[in-house]
Image: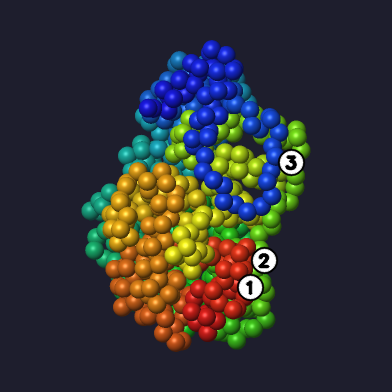
Amino acid sequence: MTLTLLAASVAAVASTGPVALQKILPAATQAAQIAPSTPGPAVTAPQAQTSAPSFAANQAIAQWNSLRQSSSQPFSSYYSFLTTYRGFPGETALRRDAERALDPAVTPASNIVAFFRIHPPLTPSGHAKYALALKGLNSGEADAAARTAWASGVLPAADESRLLGAFGPILTSADHDRRMETLLDNGDTASALRTLPYASAARRAIYDARIALQTRAPDAAAKVAALGAAASGEGGLLMDRANWFRATGQSLAARNLLAMRHTFTSRPANPEKWFETMLTMAKGAAADSQWQSAYQIASQVDDAYAPNTDISEKSYGERDEYTSLTWLAGSTALHRLGRPIDAIGMFERYGRAARSPQTRAKGFYWAARAASQAGQAERGAQLLNLAAAYPDQFYGQLAMEKLGRPIPAPSPTDRVTPTPEARAAFARRPIVEATRLLGMLGRREDQALFIRALSEQLTTDEEHALADEFARQIARPDLGVWVARNARSKGSTVYTLANFPTVPVPPAYDRHWTLANAITRQESSFDRTAQSHVGARGMMQLMPGTAREVAGQLGMPYDLSRLTGDPQYNVMLGSKYFADLMARYGNFAPMAVAAYNAGPGNVNKWIRANGDPRLPGADVVRWIEDIPFQETRNYVQRVLENAVVYDTIHPQRVQLQAQNHPSNYLGGARQVR
């Protein structure tokens, strides 16, 4: 049954009266619940939280589902939904669809402006339509909006024509230059050729050369040569020259070009695109063991910015490319060139550029290791302290162990107790009502989307406490996990028992209780119906083929539906499979956890390529970092950090006599540097 029909069925019952609605919804709730497993005090929520969702929630879900199923609905449908229901799942995609569907000839300018006041434009077309609507209302903001639209990127032909027709007289050569940079950074040479006549005379030859390089014109090299010395300081032109060399089979020339130190007279207009080119060339050099070239390319990453630029304020894509380059430069300097002093600066930049706790902790930890190798003990201690600010993260835990500090346990309760008024207001939020209703309807997969969307909107301690209460009410422990993850990514600290649920593990595998729960937290966030894009299912995200094989080994019947319908069945099979991996790798957790994610075959390849981390003197932390699959590398670190936290909550389950140290899972303190 579709979500629309389900919502409609509840709506039909609701139309017969509130008593009938109250009868059907609790029954559906009971069917959808699983037994809560999070330790901690019980919360008695007031009736405002436990009453049935409003009739509007039914309509909101039906409308949300309808908009998701088709991207070609009229703008009025998007307008009414997006202005009424803020923060529903997939909002960004719906906003893009709305901007595409918006027809200024049909929609009044006042409605267009009202929409974009609430939801600022995301696309160049949206920017153009906003500027034209402002002009239609004679707004003083129209000219500035038009300049933003003109420089924002590729425009549909109709929008480009309308924008030029309405604002051509106020667009300056500087505005056209900004547009040229954006178009060329995005490889839209057709639009760039149309705009080229409007560009400033001083930069027209540079843009012409860039177009020639991007289109692989026969005279591209000649046009670059004609620019003379000016070519060396043009960020966008350097990017295009490097890409041209690589595309024409001259990769070494491309690397040599970017390895040279340049003084920019015009910095790259789009640092993210510039970094993509740098990273491609630096990785290529590293793959060919050209370590000096790789370092020289990657270490110039900051030249794209003015001094003292705060990279952490940049977009995710830009930060991601930046940190990839600083990590490559730091690891190359430390491990390949024997230059730990250079590595310190690159790793520290990596940490300071990030927002996520795992990335910050990782950067500061490795900067500390480089400082130690360089003989800078005091600096190393300072950097370890920065990493130790994140005790629920893998590298933060390693830093705390090195500093001789115990890992703190999560708080048993939230830091604040919500007021009755706050509870009532929270319960009335449309996204909260919809989340509750989806659970009552048994639509757990859709409910999971709402849980993630809700967790992203919570910013205060009171909201986090309300979310913990709500998670218990609707029997969705995964909400607590997502609250913690999203809070950390925003620089907040949410570290309570509600963020670390547990699931019973069969007695036969009790010795792996901690790691089984650590895996479950990472795999499914304790969502028993979770299903990955590759088909892994349930609490411990078992592939059907693996589940069938393990069930046969246990002499149990295999039932695909039970992988998501019966958490105990899933955890039984997952625990057995993980126990076998632990036995296979001599109870060495990093390898068993990696094999759970990527398969034993890949782990065996990595042992052959990077050595056996179980051997005396092996650098286990570096072995984990050398895992070539980013997903598996991240997975191992997240599972092991979860295990350390679970040990703080359940110290009686710690297998070793030592304290709850990360080295317990890494072969002992002697294996951790």
**Marks 1/3: CA distance?**
33 Å
Residue situated in front as seen by the camera: 173 or 636: 636
Determine which residue is flagged by label 3.
Answer: 418
Residue situated in front as seen by the camera: 520 or 129: 520
Q: Is residue 409 left or right of residue 586?
A: right
For label 2, count other residues whose C-alpha is less than 10 Å away and answer few (under 14), some (14-19) or many (20+): some
Q: Secondary structure at mark 3?
A: loop
**Marks 2/1: CA distance?**
10 Å
Residue 619 placed where, x, y %? 46, 80
Q: Earlier in the sequence, mark 1 or mark 3?
A: 1
Residues at circles 1 and 3 in contact by the CB criterion of under 8 Å: no
Residue 585 placed where, x, y %? 37, 75
Residue situated in front as seen by the camera: 280 or 513: 513
Amino acid type at mark 3: Pro
**Is residue 42 in view from this perspective?**
yes
Residue 250 placed where, x, y %? 26, 66
Q: In the image, what residue occupies the spot 57% across and 14% down?
A: 17
* Between marks 2 and 1 in the image, the one whose residue lies nearer the viewer: 2
Residue situated in front as seen by the camera: 417 or 324: 417
Q: Earlier in the sequence, mark 3 or mark 2?
A: 2
For label 3, count other residues whose C-alpha is less than 10 Å away and answer few (under 14), some (14-19) or many (20+): some
Vertical position of residue 356 compared to residue 531: above or below: below
Amino acid type at mark 2: Pro
Determine which residue is flagged by label 2.
Answer: 408
Vertical position of residue 520 compared to residue 14: above or below: below
Determine which residue is flagged by label 1.
Answer: 400
Amino acid type at mark 1: Met
